[in-house]
Amino acid sequence: MSTLIKNNIVGVDIIEVSRFVQMKNKKVFLKTAFSQREIEESLKKVSINQSLAARFCAKEAIQKTISERLVFNEIEITNTQNGKPVVTFLNPAIKKKYDCQISLSHTRELAIAVCLTTSI
């Protein structure tokens, strides 16, 4: 009988929200960094800049936990009805390899994300 040993890796990232102040007008950046669903959900929020910054920060934290290069618009950060952030990999090959749990937080000035990634 063999036992699968899972590796857990933690990543963290912090970013200044001011970097996202006019991002809603930069369509090329939005499409390369975010999924269509993330863009639509963020544009509905009062704190658009904080929402985009927190999601981008989460993607940076996730990237720090995975050894292969990720395409940011293939990582989707959404929220459950209770507000819990959820990571979905849109690339099936990546989705089969990793499970990520994240925590996001922000103030007016800063956004931070912590990610715990488990190899499946």
Image (cartoon, rainbow, N blue to C red):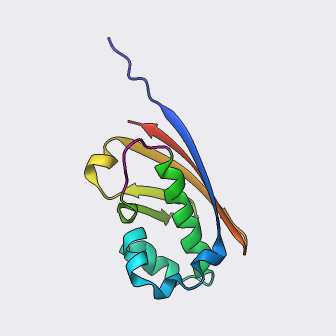
Residue visible at 54% across and 73% down? 52
In the picture, measured across the screen, residue 54 lies left or right of residue 78, that is right
Asked whether residue 84 is in view, the answer is yes
Q: Quadrant of the C terminus?
A: top left
Taking depth in this image into account, of 116 and 23 the one nearest to the observer is 23
Asked whether residue 34 is in view, the answer is no
Locate residue 42, reporting x and y percent: 51, 78
Quadrant of residue 88 within the rendered picture: bottom left
Q: Which residues are magenta?
A: 65-70
In the picture, measured across the screen, residue 14 lies left or right of residue 29, that is right
Name the outermost residue toward the top.
1
Look at the image and say whether residue 66 sits in the magenta stretch.
yes
Locate residue 71, reporting x and y percent: 36, 59
Residue 115 in the image: above or below residue 36: above
Name the outermost residue toward the bottom.
25
Q: Quadrant of the N terminus?
A: top left
> What is the magenta segment's predominant secondary structure?
loop
Look at the image and say whether residue 22 sits in the magenta stretch.
no
In the picture, measured across the screen, residue 57 lies left or right of residue 109, that is left
Locate residue 17, reporting x and y percent: 65, 73
Residue visible at 40% across and 83% down? 27
Residue visible at 37% across and 75% down? 31
